[in-house]
Amino acid sequence: MASTTSKIVTYEEWLGMPETKAKEEVFDGEIITMPPAKWKHTLIVHQLQMILVRQMDFKEVMVVTTVFGLVIRQAPLTCFEPDLAVFIRRNIVEQDGYIQSAPELVVEVLSPSNIPKRIARKTRDYESIGVPELWILSPEDRTIEVLRLQDGKLHTTQIVNEGQLHPLRFPETVVDVAAVWPD
C-alpha cells in the first residue's frame, strides 16, 4: 500500500531533499511512497525493455527503466517515475537533475498501488506534457492498452492480448505481445 506525506512540498523544497531508494511520486506537492515492485512486475518491464533495446538505435534513443524523476510540472509539483520511458536523445530536457520533457512512449505496469483514480490522473498528466503514446500493461489480464494523443487528449486506440504492437514514433519496432509476459 502506498503511503503519503501530510505536508505539501514545493519544487524548491523538493530539490533540497535527499534522494531515496524508495519509489516516490509527487501529486500536487504530496509525496507518495510506494512499495518496491514485485518480481513479476520487474520481469515484465525488463522483458519489454529488452525487446525495445534490441531494435532501437542506442545513439538516437534511450529506453529507460531505472528509477528517475519525470517532472510533469513544477507548481504544484508533480513528478512521476514511469516503469519504462522511451526518449529521443536530442529531445531530452534535463533541469535540476530531473527530466522535464515528454518521452515518446511511456509504459505503466499495473500493480496494487495503481488504483484506477491514480491511473486516470497520470493519464491526464502525461497528456498535459504531450506524451504521444502511453501503454498500460495489465499483468492480471495479460493485456496492453494503447493510448495515443489525439487533439491534446490520450485516447485508447486498442487493447490487445496477442499479436504485435508498433510504437507510434518507432513504427519499425515490433513488440510481440506474448513475449512481454514472463512464463
Image (cartoon, helix red, strand yellow):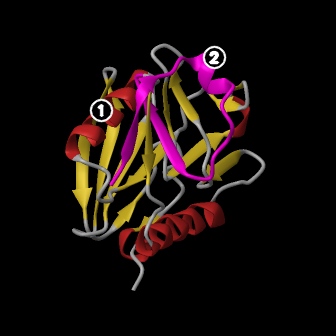
Can residue 132 be seen from the camera position used here? yes
Q: Are marks 1 and 2 in contact (CB under 8 Å)?
A: no
Task: Estimate the x, y position of residue 124 in percent, counting from the top left.
Answer: 32, 28
**Which residue is the site of mark 1?**
121
Disc 2 marks a residue whose amino acid type is Glu
Q: Is residue 150 magenta?
A: no
Q: Residue at x 52, y 52 (%)?
A: 84
96 left or right, relative to 175:
right
51 lies above or below 62: below
Residue at position x 37%, y 69% from top? Answer: 177
Find the distance from the CA under tag 1 to the CA under tag 2. 23 Å
Q: Quadrant of residue 68?
A: top right
Quarter of the picture containing the C terminus is bottom left
Q: Is residue 92 visible?
A: no
Label number found at residue 12: 2
Could you say which is closer to the camera, residue 67 or residue 89? 67
Q: Is residue 175 left or right of residue 155?
A: right
Point out the stretch of residues depicted in magenta: 1-28
